[in-house]
Image (cartoon, rainbow, N blue to C red):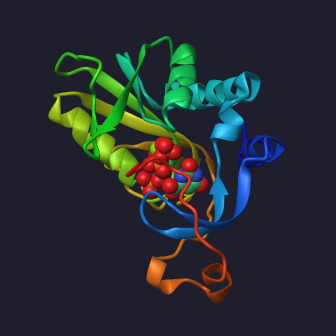
Amino acid sequence: MNTDEVLGIFREAGAVLEGHFILTSGLRSPVFLQKARVFMHADKTERLCKALAERIRAAVSGKIDYVVGPAIGGLIPAYETSRHLGAPAIWVEREGGEFRLRRFEIAKGSRVVIVEDIVTTGLSIRETVDCLRALGADVVAAACIIDRSAGKTDVGVPLIALAEYEVPAYPADKLPPELAAIPAIKPGSRNI
Ligand SMILES: O=P(O)(O)OC[C@H]1O[C@H](OP(=O)(O)OP(=O)(O)O)[C@H](O)[C@@H]1O
Ligand SMILES: O=C(O)c1cc(=O)[nH]c(=O)[nH]1
Ligand SMILES: [Mg+2]
């Protein structure tokens, strides 16, 4: 599956939003990929995640013990991708603002792959890597449906992206006037 097909699925689902968005990193952007509008459709999610699982299989040799999704956005793609990889899906979720593996125990040395929805700065994946490494996990790779950094971000492990789609994002004090003129909304769950 190529980038045009991935973006085609997002557009068909009405998931490419335009306006003024506050991203999880604090950056501001005129475009927001509302993945929930894709993941509400099992057929679309299956197509995307089957293709992502194939990319992961091609890049990662050896057993994968767990697929880990960072909640909330990573929950559905991690689960669906895990189905195609034949590995169980677990998740990290925020407790006091920090990602924790609250509901599961994993053995030290477990080989895990993180599956995210969207990457912008890579902050959320880096936080997930830190959480998992602190538990003794071997984070062999991270994967995402769309990488908005187009390969520029470093998440500390190899990043496998189904599609790369570079979208402008600005610090809050450096907004272009057309963006500053629109009230900002924050769709994601960080700090809620
Ligand atoms: O690469 P980053 O700069 O970290 O941005 C990407 C992250 O932002 C979104 O999560 P968010 O925290 O907004 O909440 P959500 O998972 O509930 O959508 C998305 O699900 C990724 O986790
Ligand atoms: O950077 C983000 O927070 C972000 C961007 C985006 O397009 N979609 C999303 O869910 N989060
Ligand atoms: Mg998220």
Q: Nearer the viewer, residue 148 or 174?
A: 174
Which image quadrant is residue 183 in? Answer: bottom right
Is 57 placed left or right of 3 in the picture? Answer: left
Towards the viewer: 174 or 180 = 180
Q: Residue at x 68, y 84 (%)?
A: 178
Q: Residue at x 56, y 25 (%)?
A: 53
Q: Residue 76 sits in which quadrant?
A: top right
**Where does the N terminus fall, quadrant-wise?**
top right
Residue 110 at least partly seen: yes
Where residue 142 sits: x, y (%)? Answer: 42, 38
Instruction: Identify the residue at horizontal 47%, vertical 68% (top origin).
Output: 27
Q: Name the spot of residue 156 as percent of width and height, x first.
A: 31, 49
Q: Position of residue 137 (x, y in %)?
A: 22, 27
Q: Is residue 79 above or below residue 148?
A: above
- In this picture, residue 190 sits left or right of residue 76: left
Q: Residue at x 55, y 83 (%)?
A: 175
Is residue 147 visible in this depiction of the protein?
A: no
How many numbered badges does the structure rendering display?
0
Query: Which residue, as the protein is rendered here, is positioned at the far bottom?
Result: 177
Indicate left or right for 43 with 179 as reference.
Answer: right
When the figure is inspected, residue 107 is found, relative to residue 189, above or below; the finding is: above
